[in-house]
Image (cartoon, rainbow, N blue to C red):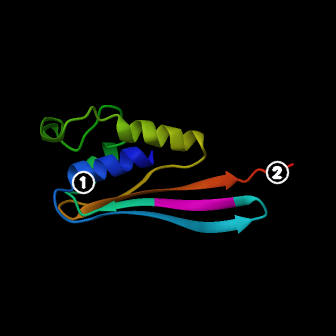
Amino acid sequence: MINNLIGNAIKFTEQGSIDLSIQKIKLENSIFTLHFSVKDTGIGISPESQKQILDPFSQADGSISRRFGGTGLGLTISNRILELMGSTLNIDSTEGRGSTFSFDLVIVKERRK
């Protein structure tokens, strides 16, 4: 997931920055919640395209696949894996200003015997 999000950020950010952030949100006993975020200053995604970007084989527009390559499956697969782990992929994007993709994960630390 992180590899896909960072790869997309690199692909769609010709100038500017890409930031990976991992924050501890909550810690109770041996259960903790982490917030992962990948933020870029790339091309961004229109509000209309954000509604379908997690659909299989979907891309922001037809010229994306010709210009940047890819099948449009990376975000779909990443979101499906997150759903299986009890989370979801969040998208915050402004066309021409960049995107932030984020998710929370609950992790249970095993106790050593």
On screen, residue 37 above or below 112: below
Q: Residue at x 76, y 59 (%)?
A: 30
Tell me which segment is drawn in magenta: 32-36
N-term-proximal mark, 2 vs 1: 1
Q: Quadrant of the N terminus?
A: top left
Real-space Cα separation, disc 2 to disc 1, in angstroms: 45 Å
Q: Residue at x 15, y 37 (%)?
A: 62
Q: Quadrant of residue 25?
A: bottom right
Amino acid under label 1? Ile
On screen, residue 113 above or below 27: above
Residue 89 in the image: state x and y as whole percent.
45, 50
Amino acid under label 2? Arg
Q: Residue at x 13, y 35 (%)?
A: 66
> Is residue 93 visible to us here?
no
Give me the disc on residue 112: 2
Check disc 1 and report the residue beneath it: 45
Judged from the image, the secondary structure of the residue bearing numbered disc 1 is: loop
Mark 2 near mark 1, Cβ–Cβ under 8 Å?
A: no
Residue 9 in the image: state x and y as whole percent.
29, 53
Q: Residue at x 35, y 51 (%)?
A: 6
| 30 displayed left or right of 46 | right
The main secondary structure of the magenta stretch is strand
